[in-house]
Image (cartoon, rainbow, N blue to C red):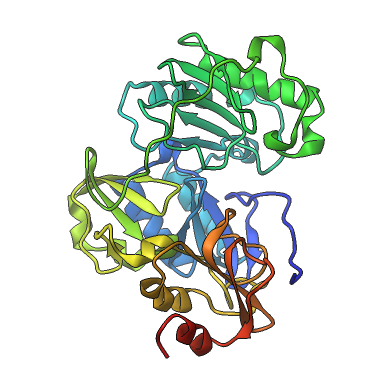
Amino acid sequence: MTGFAVRGWCPDAWRPMAAGDGLLVRVKPRLARLTHGQLRGLCTASLAHGNGLIDLTNRGNLQLRGVSDEAWPMLIERLIALDLIDGDPETEQRRTLLVAPDWQAGDDTHRIAGDLLGMLDALPILPGKMGFVIDAGPVPLLRHAPGDFRVERSGEGGLILRLDGRVAGAPLPSGHEASALVRLAHWFVESGGVAAGRAARHDAPLPGWAQAALPPAAPGAPPLPGAHPLGAAVGLAFGQIDARWLVLDAMDALVAVRITPWRVLLIEGTAPAHPALITDRADPRLRADACVGAPACPQATIETRNLAASLAPLVARRLHVSGCAKGCARARAAEVVITGRDGRFDLAFDARAGAAPVHVARTPDALLSLFGTA
């Protein structure tokens, strides 16, 4: 397996991460929502202080790319003015919250998330990759999204508190969900969970008040491009936005946008018309995962997304093209997985990135020929 550097933390706005194309600056929109003004301001800031490329992450965040060391302080000032990040770095670090993006004002997800945001100061310091999930809609949507402390709908219809990695959760009384999340986070630290790093790796017995009793309800399907109760859903190939797409007059019909962990934007109002925004739910790019690849990622030795776009129409199942064995774009197995190694591609089936290949050190043309085209 090709070696790669393992990161022990996730970047945020105050702690950017260096990449091949500059600093990555992560923005965590409150309740996964940006108003029209915030979105336009974010795009303008990305073009002024970065390279204009914005990634959607599987935590429902946005990641501005290509920011220089010199431009970073000016970008931070702009993001604070837009109310997209907190002026206090410690508060920003604690605000690691993923919500079901289809929430409605006053519903359980909206209420609980608001309560937790008001209690950030009560949270302990947690390992950098840990986070909270509020998935309290009628049907859970975030079962496969990353998160450690979870409020979910149970199969019986009530809300439960569940630690990631446990098959069931504890019933929650209404109005006490956020305080229970804070209490569970403190138990995690006090019971030695920091050494494990993530909830799913922490096997200490749960306290009596959080004993798992009720399994979560069966998850629903994430939204696909097309009409949506909020307005419309649009897909993004490989989860990336070019800010120039959205600094358009057509954006004037957009009221707000919700960020999802599925490379889909939920649009309140009318979606901007642009060929890069996927509106056809049968588009093959929706079933292809590809990391940013070389040269934007220093660990990748191959370009990924042009190959993925060419291969996607030829692969009927899930396709994953990874620039290295780390597999950042997809943690789970895919039916077809291509891993970059020393400037060439290894091909495996029903596997994760870096798995033992069936075909070794192929060129892009050689790979395409395996799937029926030269």
Q: Quadrant location of residue 282? A: bottom left
Direction from residue 210 to residue 82 in the image, left or right: left
Whether 259 is drawn above or below 308: the answer is: above
Is residue 242 visible in the rendered image? The answer is no
Q: Find residue 77 and report its horizontal and vertical position in percent.
A: 51, 51
Direction from residue 373 to residue 74 in the image, left or right: right
Q: Quadrant location of residue 346? A: bottom right
Is residue 95 visible in the rendered image? The answer is yes
Query: Which quarter of the rendering shows the N terminus?
Result: bottom right
Q: Find residue 188 and report its horizontal and vertical position in percent.
A: 73, 26
Q: Residue at the location (67% across, 66% down)?
A: 355
Whether 181 is drawn above or below 44: the answer is: above
Q: Residue at the location (52% across, 32% down)?
A: 133
Whether 215 is drawn above or below 82: the answer is: above
Query: Which quarter of the rendering shows the C terminus?
Result: bottom left
Q: Find residue 45 and report its horizontal and vertical position in percent.
A: 43, 59
Q: Find residue 41 and report its horizontal and vertical position in percent.
A: 36, 54
Viewer-proximal residue, 203 or 334? 334
Q: Residue at the location (51% across, 56% down)?
A: 63
Direction from residue 316 to residue 127 in the image, left or right: right
Viewer-proximal residue, 102 or 1? 1
- Report how many numbered discs are placed on residues in the image: 0
Viewer-proximal residue, 166 or 241? 166
